[in-house]
Image (cartoon, rainbow, N blue to C red):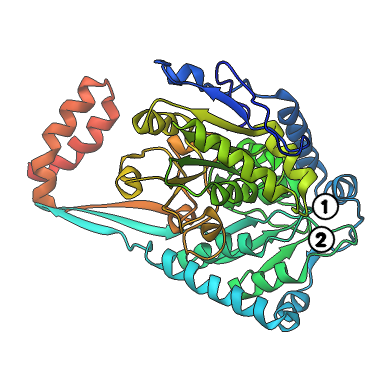
Amino acid sequence: MGHPSMGARTNKVHDYHASVPMLARSDLRGVADLASALAPPPDDPGPVRAVREIVAEVRERGDAALRDLTERFDGCRVGDLRVPTTDVAGALDGLASDVLESLEYAHGEIAAYHAAQRTGGFTLDRDGVRLTERVVPVARAGCYAPGGRAAYPSTVLMTAVPARIAGVDEVALCVPPGPDGTVPPVTLAAAALAGVDAVYRVGGAQAVAAMAYGTETIPAVDVIVGPGNVYVALAKREVAGIVGIDGFAGPSEIAILADETADPRWVAADLLAQAEHGPGGAALVLTWHDAVADAVERALGELLADAPQRAEIEATLGATGRVVLVDDVDAARAAIDILAPEHLELVCSDAEKLADDIRNAGAIFVGNYAPAALGDYLAGVNHVLPTARTARFASALRVDTFCKHVHVVEVDQPAFARVAPAVVTLAGVEGLVEHARSVTIRQEWKT
């Protein structure tokens, strides 16, 4: 969602600590053209240029470029880009019991949900013409898990588990290394639990380029999936067509529709949870009640007082936090479909009914007890979701992301005789003489 230019902004001053970031307010009550009022800002060309330079460098120089770029962006010089398989397998043994149990629980829920997506294609017989759609997994998939700011074992599970359920032959994982050149043990443990074949300590746009084109150490893949910062997301867009991608999964976003039934502290906590992901994302509240907006902002101030990452969260909310005031629930629904948020929470009356009316959202969390954090970890649904308004046409990562649909056509002789004249006619209309002859030449058996 970025920094939507939402018409007039009125920031109100409250009586709590002055350092609390004020959520920008956009009063769109009475605005007929919500689409214009909620229009996104122009794209920043800077990151696009930087990503293209990185991709070109990796494509040209391979491993050497990866080592140089890792030193430049991650602050460490790595020798062997691949993490030894013994380190990955042994990481499970070193986990605290509660962490291991939680990972195993999350793995089970994620696997159960994605197993339900698995399909085996279909066959349709129509008077001698048999049409079969085969669902075939790709041979090699590349997963990306963010790093640097924190470890994300949950993303390892979210990307690798559906790849394994799809039947992918080889699953590779790229993770940015820490300053000491290592990958966090909990990330390696998740990779072992999910059945990842190879872990590489390289991140950013350079990791995406390496998986797309291949280097001396990292074989090229067929599909690249996983979330990341704007550079990772743009790099996936750059190599789309060379490989398949899951979509534009960039900085995290949340929109919360809240009415007078919502607990403002819970709404504030969910805003903080998304802002905790770091810069570039968006945190938005939609409501038609001034009192709700005021209460959420007061609660933000209270919860931020003891937040360990207060400065970073304040910076994110200060840049992209926003309250949008609309006329009513219908206007809120229309605004949501324009914004197409990654995460959408419905904390309002008739939330279940409203969820059925929303067209554009990556994932919808319904009611007071479904915070987006559940989906991030272990509800079972995937947390790799479309961002930057791409939920208008894109979907969450799923088993089908790792599959191709191959069409198989079988025709017996009587059926061929029945359909041949129509094919010849249509080929003639299009002026494709040889198409027609490829059919008529087979009709000679009748003479």
Q: Nearer the viewer, residue 269 or 185?
A: 269
**Number of callouts:** 2
The N terminus - image quarter: top right
* Mark 1 closeness class: few <14, some 14–19, many ≥20 residues within 10 Å: many
Check residue 144 in the rendering and tell me which mark sits there, or answer none: none
Left or right of 74, for residue 211: left
The C terminus - image quarter: top left
State the image coordinates of residue 373 (x, y, percent, origin top left): 56, 57
Of badges 1 and 2, nearer the viewer stands: 2
State the image coordinates of residue 94 (x, y, percent, origin top left): 76, 81
**Farthest front residue in view:** 15
Q: Which residue is mark 1?
A: 63
Give the vertical position of 109 relative to 322 (above or below): below
Q: Tell me the quarter of the picture where residue 183 sits.
A: bottom right
Check residue 81 in the rendering and tell me which mark sits there, or answer none: 2
Can residue 168 be seen in the rendering of this structure?
Answer: no
State the image coordinates of residue 103 (x, y, percent, origin top left): 61, 73
Q: Are marks 1 and 2 in contact (CB under 8 Å)?
A: yes
State the image coordinates of residue 40 (x, y, percent, origin top left): 56, 24
Residue ID at (80%, 44%): 311
Can residue 34 be seen in the rendering of this structure?
Answer: yes
Q: Secondary structure at mark 1?
A: helix
Q: Secondary structure at mark 2?
A: loop
